[in-house]
Amino acid sequence: MEYERKRALLVKSLKEQNISDKTLSAMMKVPRHLFVPSVHMSQAYVDSPLPIGHAQTISAPHMVAMMCDLLELQEGQKVLEIGAGSGYNAAVMAEIIGQKGKIYSIERLEKLAVFAWENLERAGYSNVEVILGDGSLGYPDHAPYDRICVTASAPDTPKPLIEQLKPGGIMVLPEGEGYQRLYIIRKSMDGEVTKQDWGGVIFVPLIGHHGFKIYNSRRG
Ligand code: SAM
């Protein structure tokens, strides 16, 4: 009950930041306290990133909400997420796309892939599959995707992700090292790709073949 009250206050503050009703209603349903380590449960509904171990973070609620809105998620879509982390962002997207949709979420750290999977299981999200691997390569097994959500910052746009985006699809991804920008990438029906700069953000680095090669600890 206490968590529900705090969640309602958080959602109210997101409404004031012009988040869409569709995303707000998904965020009202997802129990974020089930996606953070127990030591941080009391802060689960503060609008900030929180540590989830292994030098990684669960993103701040306003950033999750903003990315969902920028993706223009629709019911029944097939979505690829890079960076499962806690599984929270995947759960919010899963609420929006519904049972007819599917989320494939890739995580490079085994302990976090297990953490995300357990959290999603406990919270009842059966339309999310967590995969252990290097998401900078995408996930060709189920490509192409209607939407791609990248939750770690890349040096530049990984080519496989562009290739695995459906015509008419949208991808959001942060790019940059110290100074990061969030981009909205659209692929038109005839395959033309456009890139729009949304603004400055702070994410942990995307590590991998089409990501950064060295470990560099930062908050996301
Ligand atoms: N979406 C997550 C959530 O809701 O908790 C937040 C993710 S955190 C900001 C970024 C995640 O990306 C970390 O868990 C990190 O291990 C993961 N990551 C970094 N590089 C990756 C890669 N190449 N493939 C898959 N995951 C990666």
Image (cartoon, rainbow, N blue to C red):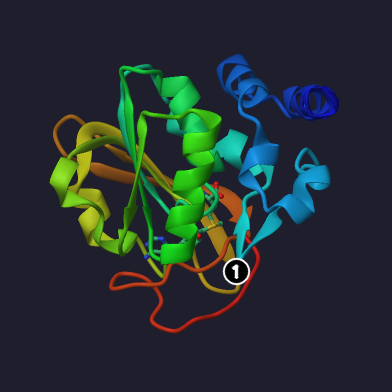
Residue at 83% in and 44% down: 42
Left or right position of 131 against 90: left
The three-letter amino acid code for the residue at tag 1 is: Tyr
User: Toward the viewer: 152 or 41?
Assistant: 41
Eyeballing the image, is 82 above or below 51?
above
Left or right position of 43 against 135: right
Q: Position of residue 111 (x, y in %)?
A: 47, 64
The crowd level at tag 1 (other Cα within 10 Å; few <14, some 14-19, many 20+) is few
Which quarter shows the C terminus?
bottom right
Q: Position of residue 150 (x, y in %)?
A: 43, 51
Residue 71, quarter of the rendered image: top left
Q: Position of residue 41 (x, y in %)?
A: 77, 46
Eyeballing the image, is 200 above or below 213?
above
Residue 188, quarter of the rendered image: top left
Which quarter shows the N terminus?
top right
Pointer 1 residue: 179
How many marks do you count on the picture?
1
User: Toward the viewer: 47 or 16?
Assistant: 47
Residue at 67% in and 21% down: 28
Residue at 28% in and 73% down: 209
Eyeballing the image, is 193 above or below 24?
below
User: Toward the viewer: 30 or 76?
Assistant: 30
